[in-house]
Image (tube, helix red, strand yellow):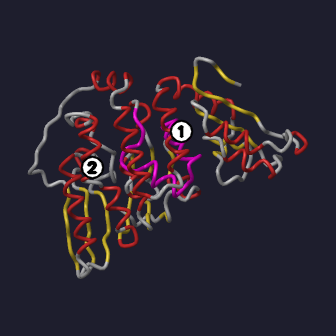
Amino acid sequence: TGDSELPLLAVDMRGVPRSFRVNNQDEELAKLIVNAPWVNVVVVDDDLDSVFAPLVDAFDVVIGDGTASEAAVDVTNTDSCLEELAAAITASPLASVALAQLLRVSHDLPIGQALHAESLTYAMLQTSERFQTWLAGRDNNTHFDPEEHAVALDLAGSLLTITLQRPARRNALNVAMRDQLCQALELVDLDRSIDGALLVGAGSNFCAGGDLDEFGSTPSPAAGHHVRMVRSLPTLMHRVANRVRVHVHGACVGAGIELPAFANSIIAHPDATFRLPEIAFGLVPGAGGTVSVTRRCGRHRTAWLALTGTTIDAEHALRWQLIDRIDASVS
């Protein structure tokens, strides 16, 4: 079904027989789906013949009705899930379509190119009416403190513990934290006397994402893109991925999961929760999430997480391989 006013196409393929194939034109249909200027959603079940797998893969979101598909979001109520997607896309249509298009092209790009594409998409959406409306309606308490000690370092032998140190702000990522975290990761990258690093968060939450007080504070979207390329936390996290372990707990929102997802090892406390909220602001994930999360749980599930802004718990994240282990001793 489709709505001319809503950039969403939903197709129900549950129980479609193998004989439904039209002259073996699945490849051409897949190309049409991938190039469509709207979000494509397909509903499948375990009765769907595997011959349709390449066609299903072309969609942006795969909803599973009792399916074990590795790409699918398995739900108990398909109609409610579609309504949730439609509501989110209605609220932020440009960001939703931009996210779908970005994930289609970037999921198999080299990391650097994929991060570049994400940053350009993010910059473009900063000029959108949706983001500007959100920006105008927020409480602007922007206060830059270049001397703030936002990251603490502790070297014990050859292990460097890096602690996000803004517990009163739920460790929200601001400019000071970004710069200090970049310095810490550069140290891990360059100093071979450091065998590895452990990234943790102080207080009751690992990281509540980007500091909303600083959203839109760069002189221009172009300047923001330049800063993201020059001071790229995602690039550094990827570079030291095999030398950094991340322990997460409490809220892991936006950058609070996008950055850890680059690491080879994420251990979560059972109370950890995960969410990608940026679409609601009229943006796409901008801390590398369209690259890192996609490479952990696939582009279809990443699209669903980002489009709906749904919060998932640690058990759910483990099933989707967004984290590697759950351990109650992590704090």
Q: Dot 2 corresponds to which residue?
A: 171
Residue 244 location in percent, x, y?
35, 69
Magenta span contains residue 309: yes
Residue depicted at x 26% and y 57%: 202
Give me the residue at 17% from left, 34% from top.
142
Is residue 72 in the magenta section? no
Residue located 80% across and 52% down the image: 50
Do callouts 1 and 2 mark residues in contact (Cβ within 8 Å)? no
Residue at the farthest right position: 19
Q: Is residue 290 above or below residue 239?
A: above
Q: What kind of element bears circle 2?
A: loop
Q: Residues within 10 Å of mark 1 (few under 14, many from 20)?
A: many
Asked whether 75 or 30 is in front, the reply is 30
Percent x, y for residue 87? 54, 25
Magenta stretch: dominant SS?
helix
Q: Quadrant of residue 260?
A: bottom left
Q: Residue 230 got which mark?
A: none
Amino acid on which the number 1 mark rests in the picture: Ala
Of the residues shown, which amino acid type is indicated by label 2? Asn
Screen quadrant of the C terminus: bottom left
Alpha-carbon span between mark 1 and mark 2: 29 Å
Badge 1 or badge 2: first in the primary sequence:
1
- For the residue pair 322 and 286, the one nearer the viewer reads as 286
| Part of the protein shown in magenta | 283-310
Can you give x and y, in whole percent of width and height, for residue 85 in the image?
58, 31
Residue assigned mark 1: 100
Crowding at label 2, few (<14), some or many (≥20) Cα neighbours within 10 Å? Answer: many
Seen at 39% across and 50% down, the residue is 252
Given this view, does label 1 or label 2 mark the residue nearer the observer? 1
Is 213 placed left or right of 273 in the picture? Answer: left
